[in-house]
Amino acid sequence: MEISNYIILATALFSIGVIGVLTRRNSIIIFMCVELMLNAANLLLVAFSQMHNFKLGKYYPTLASDAQVFVFFIMVVAAAEVSVGLAIIVMLYRNTHSVDVNFLNRLKN
Amino acid sequence: MVITSKNVIHSILFLIITFFSISGHYVLLNAQFLAIVNIIVYAGAIMVLFLFVVMLMNLNADSEPQRNKYLLYGGTIAGASLLLVLVAALKTSNDMVQLKNGNIGLIHNLGKALFTNYVFPFEISSVLFLSAMIGAVIISKREH
């Protein structure tokens, strides 16, 4: 399995997330696309950790597990972010009765 | 599929399928702990939370906001050109390495790294979770 395949897969996932954020106006779908981009970054980190373990594992034995601990912390931050973000979306829906992000262009009053 | 389906619930289900396939890739890369955590946290917790919110709001395809055609075309073109540029830039590098499976992703090694070198960020993340929980409760309680 070559590393380039994983790079292309993660790039495709990230681009799908970018397209979703740019084109959709439903705030829940925008939020899900952010999650998709985070997962693309995670996948790339795991693939690179295996690559560096193969190349440098003799000299730095803790190098690759450090990368996977990093992925674990990204997941922790994503979970915390989702809980707060969904609370914000629910409150937004209670105020405007819509999930359209274009209603958010007026922050005043 | 996640971004093209009109119905929000279909979109969430496609995203769950995507997360399961990413977990399959983690298993192939011999990162079993991350695969299990990915299934439990993302496909189990986060997506159930999304489904709860969508069903609470009673959304369906006809409550989908109207979208701008120019925004749609512009966003698609911008994302596709981002993909094109990244793939073209990565194609020129010829240092392509074959991946070999090590045993670093097992829970034994990962737990040892997490509780020796990274014990302080681990505790900080628990404080972060606590503050996120309090923040979510305060945001949803502010109405009353």
Image (spheres, coloured by chain):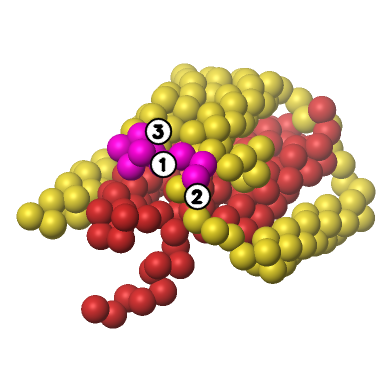
Task: Give the label on residue A83, or none.
Answer: none
Query: Quick one: label 3 or label 1, which is nearer the N terminus?
Result: 3
Q: Indicate the quadrant containing the N terminus of chain B: top left, top right, bottom left or bottom right.
A: top right
Magenta residue check for A51: no
Q: Are marks 2 and 1 on the same chain?
A: yes
- How many numbered tags mark residues here? 3
Which residue shows up at 50% across the image and 56% down it? Answer: B65
Q: Is residue A41 visible?
A: no
Amino acid type of the residue tagged 3 in the rendering: Leu
Q: Do residues under tags 2 and 1 come within 8 Å of each other at their CB atoms?
A: yes
x and y, in percent, of residue A90 in the image: 29, 49
Which residue shows up at 73% across the image and 63% down it? Answer: B73
Q: Which chain is red?
A: A
For the residues carrying marks 3 and 1, which lies nearer the camera in this image? 1
Q: For numbered disc 1, what is the local secondary structure?
A: loop
For the residues carrying marks 3 and 2, which lies nearer the camera in this image? 2
The span from disc 2 to disc 1 (Cα, nearest Å) is: 8 Å
